[in-house]
Amino acid sequence: MLTNQQTSDWNKNSGSHVRIAYAGLELKELVLNGLNENFNIIYNDSIAQLEEYLGNQSILTAPDIILIEVDDEGKCFSLVQEIKKSFLLNGTIIVLLSAKGDSDLKQKAMQLKVHDFYSAPFLIDNLRERLNFLVTFKLIKPRLLELSKEVDITYRMPLGKRMVDLLISGSMLFVLSPLFLLIAILVRLDSKGPVFYKSKRVGTGYKVFNFYKFRSMRTDADQLLAKLSAENNQYASETGNNQAAFVKIKNDPRITKLGQFLRNSSLDELPQLFNILTGDMSVVGNRPLPVYEAEMLTSNEWSMRFLGPAGLTGLWQISKRGKEDMSERERKKLDNFYAQKYSMWLDFRIIMGTIPALFQKEKV
C-alpha cells in the first residue's frame, strides 16, 4: 500500500490529516498523480481489500473519505450500503469514480446518496477541490451548530429595532403588492422556472433560514456555481486563489435578461420583506450568507459579523456595492464594524444611503 502523510492546503490551518481509503486499479495512476501530494491515501487494489481494511479500523484511524472505483459486478454499491449501516463509518464521505460514462451507474449511486460521482474523463483538479470542500463542510458543520447555540444566548434583537422592522416591512408589502404581482408575471414570461428563488442562508447567530428573492437566474444556476466560482470569482481573483470566503461572479452568465434589470434595480430583493416580517432578518444589518460562505467565517476574527442582525441592506451596500476595488477583507471589516456599533441612528443613516446605492453600474 502507498501512503502519503501530507495534508491538503485547504486544511493546513486546522492541522488535520485528511485520510482517504481508495479502492481500484483503472484510475489509480490518475488519483496518485493528482491527489497524493494533498491527502494521506491508503490504496487498495480491490473492493474486497478495501472492505478488509475498513473492518480493521477504529474510531481513531477511520478514514475521512472513501473513494471507490465502480466495478463491473457492482460490488461497490453493496459496500456503500454496508458502510452506511456501520456505526463507525456512517457519515463518512463517499465518492465513486467510474472509468466509463454510464448514466445508469450515476443514477444508482445517487439513489444510495453518495456524496459525489465522477465519470472519466474528468479533471483531477475538480475532484481535489470537491474533496477539500466536502471535508471542510463535514468538519465545520458541527461547529456551526455549536456556534448557533452560543451566539443565540448573547444576541437579542432590540425591541425598538424590531418594531421599526415590522412597521417598514408590513407597510411596504401592502403598498408594493401590485409591483409584486407585475414582477411575478414578468419572471414567468421571461424564462422557465419558479417565480421565487429560495435558498438556505446563515444569519444572526449562525442560524440557517429560507431566504427569498425573485428568480433572476437560470434554473440550473446552483449547479454552475462551483465552476464559475473557481474561474470568475471577484474575491478569488483578488486573493490569487480559489479559497475566498465570499463569492461574487463577474458578468454572471447565469442571469436572465429580466434578471439583470431586477438585480441592477435591486427589485429581486423585495421578497426578503417576508423574511423581515417573520424575524429572520432586519431592514438593516449584515447580509445573510450562503452556507458555503458562512462555513469559511467561523474564526474568532470573522465570526463577529454573526453577532449582529442579518439585514436587507447594510454598510456594505451603501459603501462598496458594485465596485471592482472592493476586497474581501474590506467587506468583512464593514460587517464586523456594524455588528459592534449598530444603533438606531446608524440604521437611519444606512437607510438614507441605500436609495442612491440601488442602481449599480458594475455587473458584479
Image (cartoon, rainbow, N blue to C red):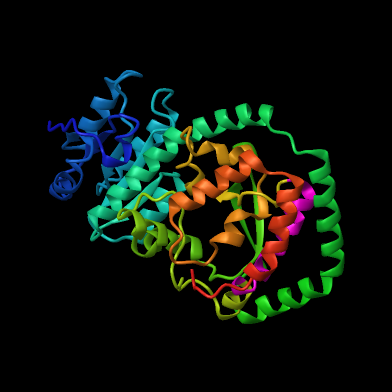
Q: Position of residue 243 (x, y in %)?
A: 36, 49
Judge whether residue 275 is colored magenta. Answer: yes
Q: Is residue 12 above or below residue 196?
A: above
**Residue beneath the point at 41% across and 26% down:** 86
Which quadrant of the view contains residue 5?
A: top left
Per the rendered image, the range of residues in magenta is 263-279
Between 328 and 105, the one lying in front of the other is 328
Seen in the picture, residue 14 relative to 263 is either above or below; the reply is: above
Residue drawn at point x = 43 percent, y = 36 percent = 138
Q: Is residue 312 magenta?
A: no
Q: Position of residue 364 (x, y in %)?
A: 48, 68
Q: How many marks?
A: 0
Q: Main secondary structure of the magenta part?
A: helix
Q: Quadrant of residue 230?
A: bottom left
Task: Determine the image quadrant of residue 296.
Answer: top left
Front-lying residue, 282 or 18: 282
For the point 34% across and 36% down, the residue is 79
Asked if one can make out residue 47 in the rendered structure from this viewpoint, the answer is yes
Q: Tell me, yes or no, if residue 207 can be seen here.
A: no
Q: Position of residue 246 (x, y in %)?
A: 46, 53
Quarter of the picture containing the N terminus is top left
**Residue 175 place in picture, x, y as percent:** 86, 69
The front one of 322 and 249 is 322
- Residue at 48%, 71% (x, y): give it: 254
Left or right: residue 273 compared with residue 189: right
